[in-house]
Image: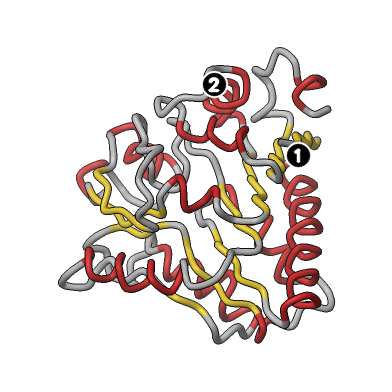
Amino acid sequence: MVLKIFADQTSLGQAAATQAAAAIRRAIAQHKRARVIAATGTSQIDFLEALTKADAIDWQRVEIFHLDEYVGLPITHPASFRKYLLERLIQTTGSTHYHFLDGDAPDPLEVSQRIGAKLVAAPIDVAFVGIGENGHLAFNDPPADFETEQPYLIVTLDEACRRQQVGEGWFHDLSEVPRQAISMSVRQILKAKEIVAVVPETRKARAVKACLEGAITPLSPASILRTHANTTVYLDRGSASLLSEPERLSS
């Protein structure tokens, strides 16, 4: 794992996008296509904006999956991750090769299995992820399942995770936040050849410290990123503010 710390969220997003764009170009050059996992949420906005402006990416050769989606939430809802990706990635780049998790479908399990089969059909070149305020990775809240090989799971969201969604402004109050979601599994995320973790803001500082300096444990789900040989974690001063040894971690 490599740790990189920047002054603010904007410079963090630009630097992470530079690495992500390079990974996409490299995959296209080697395999004629790139297979990508995209994250959502307020923490990813600057990063995705910078990525979609990157030069020399043939987005028609990029196949896009996403990490997670709420169960029972229509694509028209402001918090829908499908809506988020359509507006901030798909429509912006003109990409036509993407696989959405329809959490509003009658059978979310069937959706998870069908999209999961497409996901595992070939290696993933690069995964973009974040870290939640409770340390979650995708919607794998603590204690996360570190063992399952299923590509996607139907998970129950804990209260801390649901409160984060309210705090970020996606919902008016806790009662509006769905209690379940389709989430990519931890082991599936780790199968990506390269992982770019974009984690800005002071509100993530406690989770960052637990995941980067504490034990690797299902109680701090994103701590598992430290076991991946090609992961880069991008922080800003706020999210890195509680780290005791940033120099050692970033070596």
Q: On residue 229, which mark appears?
A: none
Instruction: Give the SS element for disc 2.
Output: helix
Where residue 161 appears, as percent x and y from the top left, is 36, 38
* Residue 96 in the image: above or below residue 107: below
Q: CA distance from mark 1 to mark 2?
A: 21 Å
Residue at point 46%, 67% (across, down)? 120
Residue at point 50%, 78% (across, down)? 98
Which residue lies under the disc numbered 2?
210
Q: Amino acid at mark 2?
A: Ala
Marks 2 and 1: in contact by CB < 8 Å? no
Classify residue 181 as left or right of residue 214. Answer: left
Query: Label 2: few (<14), some or many (≥20) within 10 Å?
Result: many
Query: Label 1: few (<14), some or many (≥20) within 10 Å?
Result: some
Which residue lies under the disc numbered 1?
8
Where residue 197 appears, as percent x and y from the top left, is 63, 45
Instruction: Give the SS element for disc 1.
Output: loop
Residue 199 or 27: which is nearer the viewer?
27
Residue 77 or 223: which is nearer the viewer?
223
Report the quarter where the C terminus lies. Answer: top right
Residue at point 76%, 39% (across, down)? 8
Location of residue 156 by image quarter: top left
Residue 8 or 217: which is nearer the viewer?
217
